[in-house]
Image: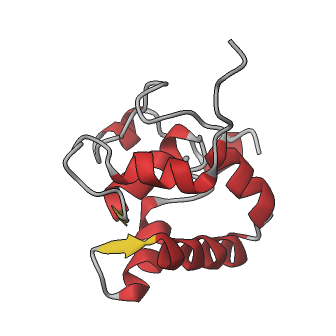
Amino acid sequence: MGDEEAATLEGQFYEYARLMDNKRSGLTITLYRSDYWFRQAKLLEDRKLTMTETGILFYKFSKTELNWDEWNEFLSDLCELKGYDEEQLKETLTNCGIPGQTPVLIPQYRDFFLTYKPKEKLPF
């Protein structure tokens, strides 16, 4: 029962890089898979952190897929931009579970208007 391996950020990177395609090597991750990971970790909420922000930072590298080192640089840039604690962010990403362990809703453009709340009525 206690033989379960502790999750690591690099192990999570490998799992999410192979999301929905087990034939992938797991050495590079796409923006979609990275955003999916952020959504599962409940970091990408469309009010605090948006897909536009992650997309701009991701494409700073002028690539469609990032390797482990580049993705870590992307993560550091994200923390600097949003003022997040990098260690806490990495811990959240490490402990969010393997892909598909919890349901992830990927909103479509029109869904935003179904749940729209004016900024004055937001809880934060």
| Residue at point 58%, 79% (across, down) | 73
Spot occupied by residue 47 in the image (x, y as percentages of width and height):
58, 52
Confirm whether residue 46 shows in the render. Answer: no
Q: How is the image coloured?
A: secondary structure
User: Residue at the spot x=58%, y=41% of the render?
Assistant: 41
Q: Residue 31: which quarter of the image?
A: bottom left
Which residue appears farthest toward the front when viewing the image? Answer: 3
Labels in figure, total: 0
- The quadrant of the picture occupied by the C terminus is top right
Q: Which residue is pictured at 36% across the width and 40% down the height?
A: 106
The one of 77 and 96 positioned closer to us in this rendering: 96
Left or right of 70, for residue 27: left
Residue 18 left/right relative to 16? left
Judge whether 80 appears above or below 29 on screen. Answer: below
- The picture quadrant where one finds residue 100 is top left
Near-viewer residue (73 or 28) = 28
Q: Quadrant of the N terminus?
A: top right
Q: Position of residue 84 (x, y in %)?
A: 76, 64
